[in-house]
Amino acid sequence: MVLARPLKRKPIEIAQALKDQLSLADAGVDRIEIAGPGFMNFRLDPAAVAAGVREIISATNAYGTNQTGGGKPVVVEFVSANPTGPLHVGHGRQAALGDAISTLLQRSGWTVSREFYYNDAGVQIENLTKSVQAHLDATGGPAQIPEGGYHGEYVGEIAKRYDQTTTVRDFAVQALRAEQDLDLKAFGVAFDTYYLESSLYTDGKVEETVNRLVTNGATYESEGALWLRATTYGDDKDRVMRKSDGTYTYFVPDVAYHVTKWQRGFTRAINVQGADHHGTITRVRAGLQALNVGIPAGYPEYVLHQLVTVVKNGEEVKISKRAGSYVTVRDLIEWVGRDAVRFFYLMRKGDSQLVFDVDLALKQSEENPVYYVQMAHARMCGIFRVGEVDREQFDGTDVDLSVLTEPEEQALIKELLEFPPLVVGAAEALEPHRITNYLTEVARLSHLWYHKHHVLGEPQPIMQARLALARAAQIVLRNALSLIGITSPERM
């Protein structure tokens, strides 16, 4: 139709001429149909589509991996909670996002380092120390927790365990770091590096950063405080760096910390943080630009996530007995299991609010997406178990795949072949929710095919081809689940 005016011919005539000139040989196209005023519909050759099954089986564990990252280093910072209490459900969403993003990047050829930045300095740590001290000072009555302090049972437990071998502050921080490590272990998340905010002060990194900013003329003094000329670098206003009492504002150590990432060779850095960190993005980047040390303007990259609301028995749950004022990650894991927690956290894009329905996560039906997906994998495995066929040894080499012509078979194969480009796109966009959406669709098509078409007991050519398709579906389901840290059960 676009060519009609310059060629002065009817669109349908042009379409027919193009059709006459095109060769379908080895093109994977069964036929070309001309429709309407000049549309050309290309119908794929079912045999060419089915041939993709062999590619999946041949690649097995490697199917869906790529090398777009070229081995370049990237540091992904996530969770990074203050060591002032157990990890709450918001930290859990961040852990699921950060871990999945890291795995996506690894499968895309990046050399990934997972990093946890411990905010073990500042007002919150002082409030934690005062809270533990309040329990130590209590004689018979309830502890008098100061304003801004922490009220969870864990605070009293720390006080009971305090052995006076170190300061209350250091003991409390170490105890809660150990507590958070248990939370992360229960969630199946491990880090390559733990970086302490306090080390930025003891190593002189904060002072060094401030001095360079002053030397570069990027600061000025006003009202007894030291200010960063942040507006020069895109911020909406200048920012206080050092208050009149001599203490630094919280974004200053953040700037110093990101300098260390750059110095450690991470030319790409990704931060997964809560939406409440939105205001820090511009000022951290402004500070890095003002240092003039070669760090690019968009460094670091940010993935922000919204809050998580937990619903149980139809009502919102806000309080955990152990934590005092919030639901913990371990609460969720104890209620519904690690796999369900991870899947539910990743069902929505990070910047959308998430309602975590505990009752839904416990259902063993198609209403529960993680159960639905894992059941699809188990069913594909079950075909081989019932047929007494060695799934791992079945390579489909001598199978005639051209017999996979049923609409449900063709739809499933096409979806399975979308997996490699999907991984590339999800990694580039830093959006692991694309994987959960994809898994749900593959599961739907797998269940549909499983219910409509028999595999075992069919004529040998059809049975062998359908076994190959079952194997391909099982491989893709397993590989996709592993991207988001979820197991692939063979029986359910």
Image: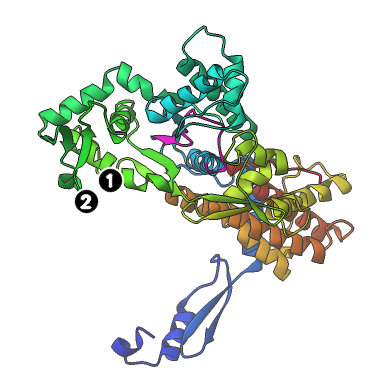
Q: Is residue 387 in view?
A: no
Q: Position of residue 175 (x, y in %)?
A: 55, 20
> In the image shown, does 56 or 108 lie closer to the viewer?
108
Distance between the alpha carbons at the discs numbered 2 and 1: 9 Å
**What secondary structure is marked by label 2?**
loop
**Rendered image quadrant of residue 126:** top left
Q: Which mark is residue 90?
A: none
Does the segment drawn in magenta span residue 485?
no
Residue 86 included in the magenta stretch of the image: yes
Q: Which residue is mark 1?
A: 282
Q: Are marks 2 and 1 in contact (CB under 8 Å)?
A: yes
> Which residues are the magenta region?
74-90
Which one is in front, 61 or 205? 205
Q: Residue at x 63, y 56 (%)?
A: 416
Residue 236's tag is 2
Q: Residue 203: which quarter of the image? A: top left
* Quarter occupied by the N terminus: bottom left
Residue depicted at x 43% and y 51%: 429
Of 387 and 211, nearer the camera is 211
Sequence-wise, which precedes: disc 2 or disc 1?
2
Total of numbered circles in the picture?
2
